[in-house]
Amino acid sequence: MTSTETRADRFVRELAELKIADPAAGRSALWLRLGAVLMAVGPVLGAAAYFMSHGTTDPLAQRDALALGLAGVCASVVGSALFLRYSLTGFLRFWMARQSYDLSVLADRLPEKEKLQ
């Protein structure tokens, strides 16, 4: 390590050595938005299925409404899982960077303490 290397440069170099995916790629933001859209579409499908099933006495149309309502529940569950996964990924990535920085600072202090004793 050179003495002119800043902490930020060292952190970027260490991340490159760990082969961690670049969060700026945009894929995680796409999945996050998709999860949010699916969470919003689920209740809309459920409401549409409710009105569709109660607006007719035809059993075939009511069964179609049940299938549509079930699709709405599935969309909400999948959307919630996607949203939770990718929103936590951003938070945990920041947390890992903070942990790495704190451990680096601690490691830099240890040799100084040994020299003083």
Image (cartoon, rainbow, N blue to C red):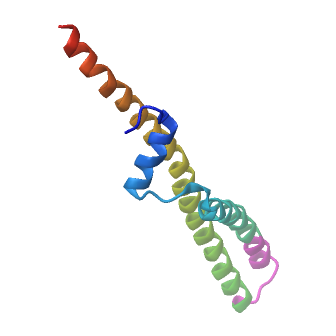
Q: Position of residue 113 (x, y in %)?
A: 24, 13
Q: Position of residue 95 (x, y in %)?
A: 47, 39
The answer to whether 101 appears left or right of 116 in the picture is: right
* Residue located 64% across and 62% down the image: 26
Q: Using the rendered view, name the quadrant where residue 105 is placed.
A: top left
> Against 77, is 96 above or below?
above
On-image quarter of the C terminus: top left
Q: Residue furthest left?
A: 117
- Judging depth in this view, the residue of 75 and 61 nearest the camera is 75
* Residue located 37% across and 39% down the image: 1
Q: Which residues are magenta?
A: 48-59
* Residue located 61% across and 56% down the image: 24
- Judging depth in this view, the residue of 67 and 3 nearest the camera is 3
Q: Residue furthest top?
A: 117
* Residue located 50% across and 41% down the image: 9
> Against 100, is 111 above or below?
above
Q: Position of residue 86 (x, y in %)?
A: 55, 56
Please check the rendered image and state whether residue 69 is part of the magenta-colored stretch, yes or no.
Answer: no
